[in-house]
Image (cartoon, coloured by chain):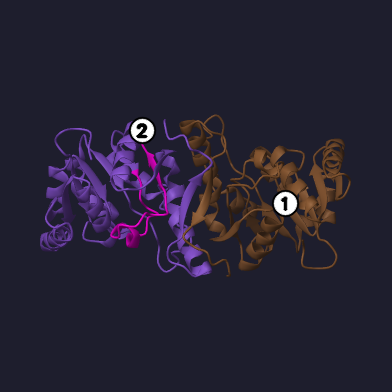
Chain colours: A purple, B brown
Amino acid sequence: MTDSPIPKTIAVLGGTGREGKGLAYRWAKAGYRVLIGSRLEDRAKAAALELLTLLNSKAFVEGTNNLKAATAADIVVLTVPYAAHRETLVLVKDALQGKLLVDVTVPLVSPKVTKVQMPSAGSAAQEAREILGDDAQIAAAFQNISYAHLMSNEPVECDVLVTGTGKEARAETLKLVEAAGLTGWDAGPIENSVVVEGMTSVLIHINKQYGTSRAGIKITGTNNRQS
Amino acid sequence: MTDSPIPKTIAVLGGTGREGKGLAYRWAKAGYRVLIGSRLEDRAKAAALELLTLLNSKAFVEGTNNLKAATAADIVVLTVPYAAHRETLVLVKDALQGKLLVDVTVPLVSPKVTKVQMPSAGSAAQEAREILGDDAQIAAAFQNISYAHLMSNEPVECDVLVTGTGKEARAETLKLVEAAGLTGWDAGPIENSVVVEGMTSVLIHINKQYGTSRAGIKITGTNNRQS
């Protein structure tokens, strides 16, 4: 849960996709108010209804369009496909003023999704900073978690590396990681996002090479989680 | 060990450094013929003597200069600091014809070693390909292994992600990983090296944040190691 008596509101833009819906499910279950955003309001409402049904209506989930969701939220999580990354950020830019953006986008380039191919900014998260400006609070996280893990209640065997424009953005995002039942690590400045976004291509390659669909990563060698 | 009756010869360029010496130790112990290369032949001979002493002379280790080591070897492993990466590759370029190069270099930029800062080629391994040409067989590996782990005989809690210009280069390097007593994974094309090289900065950041010196990564979610 959040650390304030009033639960924070998280907008999950692109929340009708599998990754976004999985994260929305976990946060709604943890007690956050969740707004599912989509280009199409009807699809967002349908996804919200699906999650409410799964959670026996013991949660706050609403569906609306991406702009309204971003405007009404405290924290905005971006889970759109990379092809819609720029246009969605441009759409919600003004609504993000003073809010934390958590970018989940992985810039996969079909058909070679097993090969790391970053945009010229260096990574999707750095591209978001170019679009939003240097004052924006941006973190990047959850890029390596398979959607299949999120909708199940099994423990997830994949850690979450959190990069961001500042320590506060990363710390706030680490709370969301924990609320989702996952293990997170402060992985450093926004420039380190290339490692985490690119790791998704590496994991897809490992899945193909070793005949699985569940490859993930774990940080080893440290038990001390205080920062 | 190697798969041929005659042990292969591995040159470890920059093998007087801690990382290179640790790898040389493990390969010599596994039965490979190891040539320690250095800019200064005397330092290479001293390092070779040190390893032979540790191994009770039950191994083949010789010290020489980088060019002679590369010329005499079947496989060449590059463990120089990034500042000497380009000049060493230019020096041994002709000696590498038809041989596998395993690049261990991490392009850390002081003082911000916790921030990923790749060269314009995309990574040190891709820079090696630019220098050596498109026909070169190059793999990149071992960038995330702490030297402190290599000289001890304890199990190493860090996997090795192997990228490379082709499947054969990666497969040959995975044999070296296994011979060193480590767990390796085929992590895809040479373009994916940015993830593995950059992970070193992420792990240094995690070490600082969480008060350890032994952070590493493990691949999870797959038990099937056949490729």
Residue A90 as seen in the image, left or right of residue B7: left
Residue type, label 1: Val
Q: Main secondary structure of the magenta part?
A: loop
Pick the front one: A77 or A222: A222
Location of the N terminus of chain B by quadrant is bottom right
Residue B158 as seen in the image, left or right of residue A70: right
Per the image, label 1 sits on a secondary structure element best described as: strand
Query: Do the residues indicated by labels 2 and 1 lie within the same chain of the protein?
Result: no
> What residue is shown with label 2?
A166
Determine the image quadrant of residue A156.
bottom left
> What residue is shown with label 1?
B77
Query: B6 above or below A32?
Result: below
Residue type, label 2: Gly
**Spot occupied by residue A41 in the image (x, y as percentages of width and height):** 11, 59
Inter-mark Cα distance, 2 to 1: 37 Å
**Spot occupied by residue B71 in the image (x, y as percentages of width and height):** 83, 54
Query: B67 above or below A206?
Result: above
Residue B223 as seen in the image, left or right of residue A145: right
Determine the image quadrant of residue A185.
top left
Q: Residue furthest right?
A: B57
* Number of on-image labels: 2
Q: Dot 2, crowdedness within 10 Å: few (<14), some or many (≥20)?
A: some
| Residue B91 seen in render | no
**Which region is colored magenta?**
A140-166
Subunit under mark 2: A
| Residue A178 seen in render | yes
**Spot occupied by residue B12 in the image (x, y as percentages of width and height):** 76, 48
Per the image, label 2 sits on a secondary structure element best described as: loop
Determine the image quadrant of residue B135.
bottom right
Residue A61 falls within the magenta-colored stretch: no
